[in-house]
Image: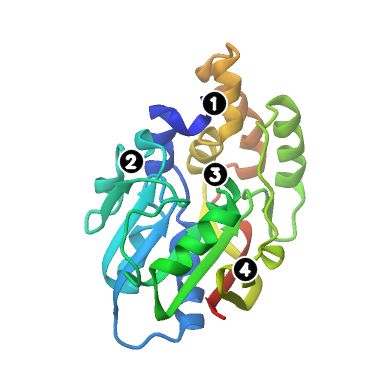
Amino acid sequence: MTAYTSTRVAAAYAFDRPHVHERLMDVIVERLRIGPKLARALDIGSGAGLSTAPLDRLAARTIGLEPMVSMLTYSRVVAPRAVFVAGHAERLPFGAASFDVVTAAGAINYADRDLCLPEIARVLTAAGALVVYDFSVGRRLRDNAALERWHDAFERRFPSPPGYELDVRALPFARAGLRLDSFEELAAALPMDLASYVRYVMSEARIELALSRGEAEHAIRDWCGQTLSPIFRDRTLDVIFDAYVAIVRRG
């Protein structure tokens, strides 16, 4: 069982996560140099739908694909104009040349790259593009190290389950008939207050791990609120999410 089989996590991802995907979509739209809307977009690893909803700006029809069925519980609320399908990136249940753009936000980390990349290439149209992007935990503020120090303590108190690192620039694109067209690192700043930031950190996978080990949710939430209060006080602060956007095209 992983954190992503939890209905608590599904609700937290749907309603408590900051809209970093929406902010990064500004960059993606610009880099893809799209005029009229594309016909179809596929979001691999859609989760609760936060990465799927902004694709309305790119395509007339959007499909979100998610292997963890429980994560789709609130997807129609989050992205009401999208269609969601349970499935795996290694076996895409779509025909050849079905999509003008495929996005994968923090998703290829969890897939078999040797299987999923040829599948993505198969479903892309000849002029289509794959957009691989991701972003860090929001653990820093502008010109203030207080939140970083808090996160160090948070991560020590609540260890994270094993992660899946990914260096997009090292992926075997060529073997799938693809090539890395561009790679850009950037930072997205989102305004958050104490309440929204506590909800956000409570959605992290490390909290689900702590709960599975017997810690009480209210006690964790209280600790977060009490220790974050001196940082946020009654203010709204810009929380920085470090990100990257990679555009991949046919080779």
Q: Give the residue at x 34% y 54%.
A: 64
How many angstroms separate mark 2 from mark 1 (CA)? 18 Å
Judged by depth in the image, the label closer to the viewer, 1 or 4, is 4
Quadrant location of residue 166? bottom right
Instruction: Compute the Cα span from label 1 to label 4.
Output: 37 Å
Q: Secondary structure at mark 3?
A: loop
Crowd class of label 2 (few under 14; some 14 to 19; many from 20; radius 10 Å): many
Which residue occupies the foreground of this view, 67 or 16?
A: 67
User: Which amino acid type corresponds to the residue marked 1 in the rendered image?
Assistant: Glu
Report the Cα–Cα distance between label 2 and label 4: 32 Å
User: Which label is found at residue 208?
Assistant: 1
Q: Closer to the camera: disc 3 or disc 2? A: 2
Decide: is 234 above or below 176: above
Q: What percent of the width, then of the height, locates residue 158?
A: 68, 26
Proximity of marks 2 and 1: CB atoms separated by less than 8 Å: no
Which circle, 3 or 4, is nearer the viewer?
Answer: 4
97 left or right of 232 in image: left
Which residue in the structure is indicated by mark 4? 175
Q: Is tag 3's residue or tag 4's residue first in the polypeptide sequence? A: 4
Name the residue tied to disc 2. Answer: 72
- Where is residue 86, by image quadrant? top left
Q: Secondary structure at mark 1?
A: helix
Determine the CA span between mark 3 and mark 4: 53 Å
N-terminal-most mark, 2 or 1: 2
As shown in the figure, which amino acid type bears the numbered disc 4? Arg
- The residue that appears at 43% across and 47% down in the rendered structure is 88
In this rendering, the label closer to the viewer, 2 or 1: 2
Q: Are marks 2 and 4 in contact (CB under 8 Å)?
A: no
- The residue tagged 3 is 234
